[in-house]
C-alpha cells in the first residue's frame, strides 16, 4: 500500500510549524511597527520631507507616494521589509525542503518509503505555497485590523489584492529555490539562485528606470510583476500575477523533471 | 521467480568515478545474505540502487521481480530499508518521526512500532537530536522492521549498537527470516554477518568476488594447525601433502594452514610422537585478505577479473 495523499506534507508541516509561526509573528510585528507610524509621518508630513531629496533617490527607494495610506503602506510594508521577510522565509524554506533535506540526509527514509518522487516533491512544494499564503494572510489581517483602529483608507478588496500579490511573489521565488535545489541537490545553489533573482529583480525594477532608454528592463523583474502596478492602490494586477505564476510553474516543473530523473543522495 | 534480488552486470558511475564495475548478485527468497566488503567497496551504492535512490549506469536490476524504477512506490511498500548513514531530523521526537514514516506506509506499520521500540529500549518521547548514535540506530531498525516487509535491506545494521543489542538485532533478523522475509544486509566485519547470514557475498572494488554459504567459506578458509613433536621433524615430510599449505617447521614445532580434511596430515604425523596439537578456525577475515591478495581465488572466476589492482585503502 502506498502513502495516503498529504502524508509528506503533513510530516513537513508538523516539523516546521513552529518556525513558520515565528515567521508570521515577526512579519506581523514589522507590519504593525511601520503602519502605526503612518499617522505621525505620513500624509503631508512625508511629502514635505521627501521634497528635500533628489527625485531619483526617492524613486530608487520606492518612496514615490508616501502621502496616502495605501502609498505609505505599499512603500514600507509591501515594498521593503515585509517583502524581504517573506522572501527570506520562502526562499529559505524552498531551499531547505528538498535540497536541504537531501544534503543532511533526512530525505532518505522518505524516499525509501512507498511514496513516489513526484509526491515527495509536489507535497513539499504545496507546503511552500501554504507558507507563502500564511505569510501574506498575516500581513493582510494585521493591516485590516490597523486600518480599522487607525482609520486608514485601505479597503478590504485592495488589501486582498496586495496580499495575493505578496503570496504569489514569495511563492514564486520560493519555488525557484525549491526547483533549483531539487534539480541540483545543493542547498547553496538553491539559496543563491533564489536570492540572486530577488536582488536582480529589485535592481531592475528601481534602478533600470533611472537609466535613459532602459525603462523597459523593469518589465523583466519579478519584483516589478509583484508591486509595479501598486495593487494596494489599484487592485489585482492580472498581468503581474500571471507572470509570477508562470515563473513558478516553469521553475517548479523544471525542478520536478530533473528530480525524478537524477540520482538522489549521491553526494553523501 | 525464486530470486528476491537479481542483479546482473550492474555498473554505476558518479561523474567520472566508477563505483560499481559490473556487479552480479542473487538473493534467494527467504534467505539471509550478507554483503561483505570494506568501506568504499560499493555495498551502499548497490543497496541504494535497489531502493531506486540511484539509477544504474548499466546492467539490470530486479527486486521482487521488478525493476526498482518501474516498481516505484508500490515496490518500495514491500521493502524495509535501513540506510548506512542514518540521518534524522533533530527536533522531532522519535515517536513522531516513526509515526510519520509509518503513516507513509498506510498499513498496520504504526501498530508494530511500540513493541519494537520497547524491545530495543528506545524512548519514543525524546527528540531525535538528543539521542546517542546507538539510540538513533534503534530508530532506524524500528522503522525498517515495523512494516514487516517481504524484503529487508539493511546497510551496516549493527553499527553503533552495543553487543547486547547486536544480539537482539540478530534475533530479529532470524525471526523475520522465519516469517518468510528475505534479508540482505551489508557489513564490513565478518563476525557480524557470520552468525546471522546463510550465505555471504564478498564485494570488493565494485564487484562481487565470491559468493558462498557461510559454512563452505569457513571450510575453505581452513584452520591454523600447530603440531608439537617429541623430536625435531623434517619439513619435507609435510610440505606438499594434500590440503596442507604454508608449512613452517621450527625444530619440533610444525605450523601449517589446513584446508579440507586433516586425514593426510594426521597420517604423516602418526609415525612420530605428537606432544601437543591445536587446530583453530581461521577468521573469515583472513579469507577475505586472501581474496585481496589474489589467492584462494574462487573456482570459475578468472583471477584477473576477480582481483584486479589492490583496492584503495587496503594494503595486502
Image (cartoon, coloured by chain):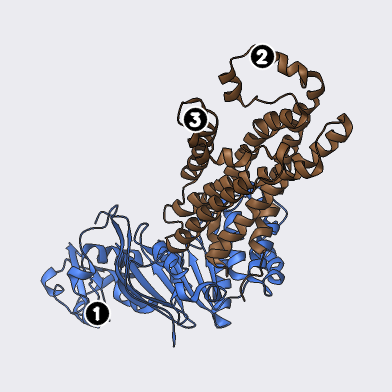
Chain colours: A brown, B blue
Identify whether B89 is placed above or below B280.
Answer: above
Residue A11 percent location from the top left of the image = 67, 58
**What chain does mark 3 sit on?**
A
**What chain does mark 2 sit on?**
A
Q: Mark 2, residues whose alpha carbon is within 10 Å: few (<14), some, or many (≥20)?
A: few
Choose between A136 and B80: the one closer to the eye. A136
Viewer-nearest of discs 3 and 1: 3
In screen coordinates, is A150 left or right of B136?
right
Residue B93, can we see it?
no
Choose between B269 and A66: the one closer to the eye. A66
Considering only order in the chain, which callout, 3 or 2, is on the residue closer to the N terminus? 2
Q: How far apart are marks 1 and 2 (CA)?
A: 111 Å
Q: Residue A208 carries which label?
A: 3
Residue A233, can we see it?
yes
Secondary structure found at label 3: helix
In screen coordinates, is A189 left or right of B180?
left
Q: Residue furthest top?
A: A52
In percent of the image, x 49 and y 30: which residue is there? Answer: A208
Q: Which mark is residue B266?
A: 1
Q: In the rendered view of the protein, which quadrant contains the N terminus of chain B?
A: bottom left
Q: Mark 2 points at which residue?
A: A51
In percent of the image, x 65 and y 24: which residue is there? Answer: A63
Image-quadrant location for residue A85: top right
Residue B28 percent location from the top left of the image = 43, 82
Q: Mark 1, residues whose alpha carbon is within 10 Å: few (<14), some, or many (≥20)?
A: few
Residue B231 percent location from the top left of the image = 19, 67
Q: Residue furthest front?
A: A213
Amino acid at each position: 500500500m502506498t502513502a495516503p495523499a498529504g502524508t509528506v506534507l503533513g510530516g513537513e508541516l508538523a516539523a516546521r510549524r513552529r518556525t513558520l509561526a515565528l515567521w508570521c509573528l515577526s512579519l506581523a510585528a514589522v507590519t504593525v511597527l511601520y503602519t502605526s507610524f503612518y499617522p505621525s509621518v505620513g500624509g503631508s508630513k512625508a511629502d514635505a520631507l521627501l521634497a528635500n531629496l533628489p527625485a531619483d533617490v526617492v524613486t530608487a527607494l520606492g518612496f514615490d507616494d508616501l502621502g496616502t495610506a495605501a502609498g505609505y503602506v505599499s512603500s514600507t510594508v509591501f515594498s521593503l521589509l515585509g517583502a524581504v521577510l517573506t522572501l527570506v522565509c520562502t526562499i529559505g524554506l524552498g531551499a531547505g525542503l528538498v535540497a536541504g533535506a537531501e544534503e543532511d540526509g533526512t530525505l532518505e527514509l522518505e524516499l525509501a518509503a512507498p511514496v513516489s518522487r513526484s509526491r515527495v516533491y509536489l507535497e513539499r512544494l504545496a507546503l511552500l505555497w501554504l507558507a507563502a499564503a500564511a505569510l501574506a494572510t498575516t500581513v493582510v489581517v494585521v493591516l485590516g485590523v490597523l486600518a480599522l483602529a487607525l482609520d486608514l483608507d485601505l479597503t478590504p478588496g485592495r488589501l486582498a489584492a496586495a496580499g495575493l500579490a505578496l503570496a504569489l511573489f514569495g511563492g514564486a521565488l520560493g519555488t525557484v529555490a525549491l526547483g533549483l535545489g531539487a534539480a541540483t541537490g545543493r542547498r547553496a545553489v538553491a539559496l543563491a539562485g533564489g536570492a540572486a533573482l530577488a536582488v536582480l529583480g529589485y535592481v531592475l525594477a528601481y534602478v533600470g528606470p533611472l537609466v535613459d532608454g532602459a525603462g523597459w528592463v523593469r518589465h523583466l523583474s519579478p519584483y516589478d510583476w509583484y508591486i509595479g502596478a501598486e495593487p494596494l492602490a489599484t487592485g489585482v494586477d492580472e498581468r503581474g500575477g500571471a507572470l509570477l505564476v508562470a515563473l513558478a510553474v516553469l521553475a517548479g516543473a523544471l525542478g520536478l523533471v530533473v528530480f525524478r530523473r537524477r540520482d538522489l543522495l549521491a553526494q553523501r | 521467480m525464486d530470486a528476491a534480488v537479481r542483479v546482473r552486470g550492474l555498473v554505476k558511475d558518479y561523474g567520472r568515478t566508477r563505483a560499481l564495475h559490473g556487479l552480479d548478485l542473487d538473493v534467494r527468497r527467504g534467505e539471509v545474505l550478507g554483503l561483505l566488503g570494506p568501506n568504499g567497496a560499493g555495498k551502499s551504492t548497490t543497496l541504494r540502487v535497489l531502493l531506486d535512490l540511484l539509477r544504474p549506469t548499466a546492467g539490470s536490476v530486479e527486486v521482487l521481480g521488478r525493476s526498482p524504477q518501474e516498481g516505484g512506490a508500490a515496490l518500495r511498500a514491500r521493502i524495509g530499508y535501513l540506510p548506512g548513514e542514518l540521518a534524522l531530523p533533530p527536533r522531532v521526537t522519535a515517536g513522531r518521526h516513526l509515526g510519520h514514516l509509518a503513516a507513509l506506509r498506510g498499513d498496520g506499520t504504526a501498530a508494530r512500532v511500540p513493541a519494537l521500540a520497547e524491545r530495543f529500549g528506545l524512548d519514543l518521547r525524546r527528540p531525535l537530536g538528543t539521542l546517542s548514535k546507538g539510540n538513533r540506530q534503534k530508530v532506524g531498525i524500528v522503522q525498517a522492521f515495523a512494516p514487516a516487509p517481504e524484503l529487508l535491506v539493511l546497510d551496516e545494521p549493527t553499527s553503533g549498537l552495543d553487543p547486547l543489542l547486536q544480539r537482539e538485532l540478530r534475533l530479529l533478523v532470524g525471526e523475520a527470516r522465519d516469517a518468510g522475509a528475505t534479508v540482505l544486509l551489508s557489513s564490513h566485519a565478518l563476525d557480524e554477518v557470520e552468525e546471522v547470514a546463510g550465505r555471504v557475498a564478498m564485494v570488493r572494488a565494485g564487484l562481487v568476488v565470491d559468493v558462498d554459504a557461510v559454512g563452505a567459506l569457513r571450510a575453505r578458509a581452513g584452520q591454523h594447525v600447530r603440531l608439537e613433536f617429541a623430536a625435531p621433524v623434517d619439513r619435507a615430510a609435510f610440505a606438499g601433502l594434500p590440503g596442507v599449505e604454508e608449512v613452517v617447521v621450527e625444530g619440533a614445532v610444525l605450523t601449517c594452514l589446513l584446508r579440507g580434511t586433516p586425514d593426510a596430515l594426521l597420517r604423516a604425523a602418526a609415525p612420530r610422537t605428537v606432544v601437543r596439537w591445536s587446530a583453530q578456525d581461521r577468521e573469515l577475515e583472513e579469507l577475505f585478505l586472501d581474496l585481496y591478495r589474489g589467492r584462494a581465488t574462487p573456482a570459475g572466476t578468472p583471477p584477473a577479473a576477480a582481483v584486479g589492482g589492490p583496492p584503495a585503502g587496503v594494503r595486502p
